[in-house]
Amino acid sequence: MKTGEDRRLTDIDTQPLGAAWSHDGTRIAYIDVDGRWGVAGLCVVDVATGKITRLQGSLGQPGSPSWSPDGKYVAIPLSYKYSNSFREGTNQVYMVPTDGVGKAFWHLPEPNMSMDTRAGGGPAWSPDGTKMAAIYEGLLKIWPVAADGKPLGPPRSYTSDISYFPSWAGDNKTILFQSADKLKSLDTETGAITDIPLDLTYRIANPTGRTVIHVSNLVDSVHDVTQHDKDIIVDGHRIAEIRDHDPALHQAEHFVDGTGLTAIPGLIEHHSHAQKDFGSNLERAWLAYGITTVRDPGTQIYDAVEDREAAESGARLSPRLYVAGPLLEWQRVYYKMGVAVSSPAHLEREFTRMRALHYDMIKSYVRMPDLFQRQIVRAAHEMGIPVSGHEIFPAAFSGVDGTEHMGATSRRGYSPKQGPQGMAYEDVIQLFGRSGRTLTPTHFGAMTPYLAKHPGYKDDPRLNLYPVWARETITEADPMASMLRPLLEGQYKSLKKMYDAGTLVTAGTDTMIANNLHAEISSYVDAGLTPFQALQTATVNSAKDLNLDAGTLEAGKLADIVLVDGDPRADIANTFKVKKVMMNGVIHDVDDIVAGGMRK
């Protein structure tokens, strides 16, 4: 701090998150993401030597650590499961001794009541060790604890507005916390709450200048034809004109020679949860695989907004991001990016935050009762944003706009979309088709047959943007994919029937690893769609669902342009062969994107 010099403390291939200083300043605890969907261990690093001690092996999406004052314990939020088969439970306090010998144990400050979320909901241990703070029911609550974190009384509310991410000051009485789009402090002795002035304005990056892109082929995602020898004229970040090739245009200030390449619209990943597990390489990899827009239907609350604003302002090389708030779950919760909504009053507080942070959509999750699901639809539609979920009925009746997954669960037992062997019955097909609702199939297991056809894709250098464990989900046998693979044939038949009935099919993968999107749209061809129709699921169809002025190559549209080697209409796998990407008025070579994100 005195010199302003940085010192790199760790050299690991996994992703450290949630760093927390011990009170004596000698150690830092962190969660170590080493598996898909936020699975992470708990580690402590010695600040002087850099020695890492692993206190816990891989845990189910733990939250950030908080130290006891004497350094003997680290508290983390973790899911206390009611059932392994259904996985969900309540977020409780998991105590981990730091001596490497003692056994971890649970504290339940309020049994059967869940901390809202493991992503910023606490617990935060006071510096003197006498209290803990966390978020319950959308409110900041505090309770007394013993030296080992044992609750000595029930949590008591200190706020009436939506709250998040409590942090103690050194005086043991002041807590800093977020409230919707505000930053506030609480004096726990007097109850006084003070607004802290904060300027979070930013400027959207609007590029200027003209770029001319010459391509040998062009598929506009509107007409099922391949056009040849075309120039795409881009003013700022919009397509001004597409015309026959004119060598005179080569004199433009910004000229891109795409001779031999095919221009297609930027791909849209319609279902991916943008976690911090890969750092900024997550966004780089999406672009490198030709993905220029990502829809995130549920994520950690403020991470989503930060990601979106970093992309819009040009502060981070990234696709455009459409983000939801957290998964809105009813009382129990499994995923770290979910919120355990405890009551109708709590749900209204979530709506307050939704409006303040301007979510792009909301996802009603698998335990939300009909009555409150309808309230979610009402609040979202008043904002002009859509609602999605896992169900088809009664969600279609309640006004939910779209459905995620061909086969994902509903904890309420309503309307599975598929029966045995992945087959859908006619009532489900007609519910999708006649409503014209959106379906994002997420064909888990599609990567295996895709790589069987294209084994060389396992060695693609873009995979090096991911940590080793993430690469192995592509290159090694995936137990989950193996389990679900027998369902694929039935899912393919059902998808084709739904598509023919009028369902708006949008391509998404439920994974952050970008090449899964190419396997997904390839699986639609296996299901009976033409390559052109499959391309549309990741371009114009998804743009329609997002109300996004992109998804096609036409004058006036946003210039989200990908140059690939080969014609996707001849072989949909050619979408994988990305050479250049235009995003926000700037053309990027894929090799440069990869080189800029390589781990040192």
Image (tube, helix red, strand yellow):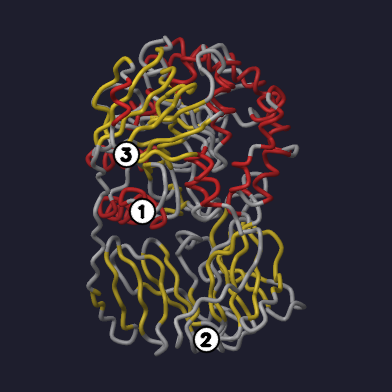
Compared to residue 396, the image places residue 96 above or below, namely below
Element on which disc 2 rests? loop
Q: Is residue 187 left or right of residue 424?
A: left
Q: Is residue 338 left or right of residue 205?
A: right
**Residue carrying label 3:** 585
Residue at 72 percent across and 32 percent down: it is 483
Residue at 51 percent across and 76 percent down: it is 6
**Residue carrying label 1:** 310
Q: Earlier in the sequence, mark 3 or mark 1?
A: 1
3 and 2 marks in contact (CB < 8 Å): no
Q: Earlier in the sequence, mark 3 or mark 2?
A: 2
Q: Nearer the viewer, residue 105 or 205?
A: 205
Q: Residues within 10 Å of mark 3 (few under 14, many from 20)?
A: many
Residue at 30 percent across and 55 percent down: it is 353
Q: Nearer the viewer, residue 195 or 314?
A: 314
Q: Residues within 10 Å of mark 1 (few under 14, many from 20)?
A: some
Q: Percent position (x, y) of residue 532?
A: 47, 14
Q: Percent position (x, y) of residue 45?
A: 64, 76
Element on which disc 3 rests? loop
